[in-house]
């Protein structure tokens, strides 16, 4: 048996989390739990709730054969609360899937994304985490053939989780193009595209709204997630949660303010 926890940042009633659940229900021997925000929490990053109480509420989930709860918190809260409050110590989830998000989470989006934080929180708790996002921001009610397209991907992630073959301290960021399945070019590894959009603010009334400007799609030259997605590939990026720059850490020994204090003890 494989125990699967599903969360998202678009809210428990979003179509994307239903599509993800439908895809995972096709896995043999899967026991599925859904724990998601009771309302949309897009862009909240890895925020967790400290100053108010979390109240998990059982939730009917489209009549599907899963156990579901809605939580008055963020995606990271959902995973953390599920781990500590809803599962017995000997019955923790084997893998966490977060999504399917409306719109992509590419490049530096991983730091703002509630979808990614759900997968990241799983890894912090010692559970493999996979974030899935779909490039349908301008066609939000249309999830096309996404269930069929992610089938081999969720199958392999699930099998590797069952065997303990997924690396620790890494969550997987998956972005899916909004194309028919017969136009999908493949599933490929990708680097984060950190500079593919520019943030600006537009004045409306008395306030300012954040907007993003994206470049025209250029010929595919680098294996970046944005470029690969826009050329019809599912892009998969392993994201390590230890962000320490090991090379720079070694160089710090030669910085003046550190040398002036001498070497550390021990």
Image (tube, rainbow, N blue to C red):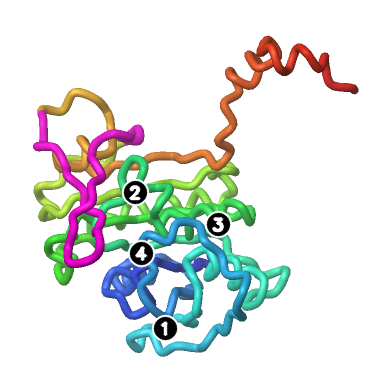
Horizontal side of residue 72 vs 242, given as left or right = left
Q: Position of residue 215 (x, y in %)?
A: 14, 37
Q: Earlier in the sequence, mark 4 or mark 3?
A: 4
Mark 2 or mark 3, whichever is nearer to me: 3
Residue at the spot of label 1: 65
Inspect this view and state whether residue 162 appears.
no
- Judged from the image, the secondary structure of the residue bearing numbered disc 2 is strand
Q: Position of residue 42 (x, y in %)?
A: 35, 64
Q: Residue at x 31, y 44 (%)?
A: 106
Counting residues from the N terminus, which is met first, the one under dot 2 or under dot 4? 4
Residue pointed to by mark 4: 42
Q: Residues within 10 Å of mark 2 (few under 14, many from 20)?
A: many
Give the residue drawn at x 54%, y 52%. 128
- Earlier in the chain: of badge 2 and badge 3, it is 3
Image spot of residue 177 (x, y percent): 19, 50
Distance from Cα at disc 2 to Cα at disc 3: 16 Å
């Amino acid at each position: 048996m494989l125990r699967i926890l599903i969360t998202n940042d678009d809210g428990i009633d979003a179509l994307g989390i239903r599509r993800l659940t439908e895809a995972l229900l096709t896995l043999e021997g899967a026991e599925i739990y859904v724990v998601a925000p009771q309302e949309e929490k897009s862009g909240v990053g890895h925020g967790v709730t400290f100053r108010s109480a979390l109240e998990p509420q059982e939730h009917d989930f489209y009549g599907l054969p899963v156990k579901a709860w809605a939580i008055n918190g963020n995606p990271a809260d959902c995973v953390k609360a599920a781990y500590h409050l809803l599962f017995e110590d000997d019955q923790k989830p084997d893998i966490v899937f977060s999504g399917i998000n409306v719109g992509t989470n590419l490049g530096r989006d991983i730091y703002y994304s509630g979808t990614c934080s759900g997968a990241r929180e799983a890894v912090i708790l010692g559970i493999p985490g996979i974030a899935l996002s779909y490039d349908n921001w301008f066609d939000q009610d249309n999830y096309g053939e996404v269930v069929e397209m992610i089938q081999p991907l969720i199958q392999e992630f699930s099998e590797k989780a069952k065997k303990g073959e997924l690396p620790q301290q890494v969550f997987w960021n998956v972005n899916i193009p909004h194309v028919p399945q017969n136009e999908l070019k493949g599933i490929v590894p990708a680097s984060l595209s950190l500079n593919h959009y520019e943030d600006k603010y537009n004045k409306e009334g008395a306030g300012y709204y954040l907007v993003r400007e994206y470049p025209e799609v250029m010929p595919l030259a680098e294996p970046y997630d944005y470029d690969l997605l826009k050329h019809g590939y599912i892009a998969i990026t392993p994201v390590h949660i230890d962000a320490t720059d090991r090379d720079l850490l070694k160089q710090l020994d030669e910085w003046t303010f550190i040398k002036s204090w001498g070497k550390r003890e021990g």
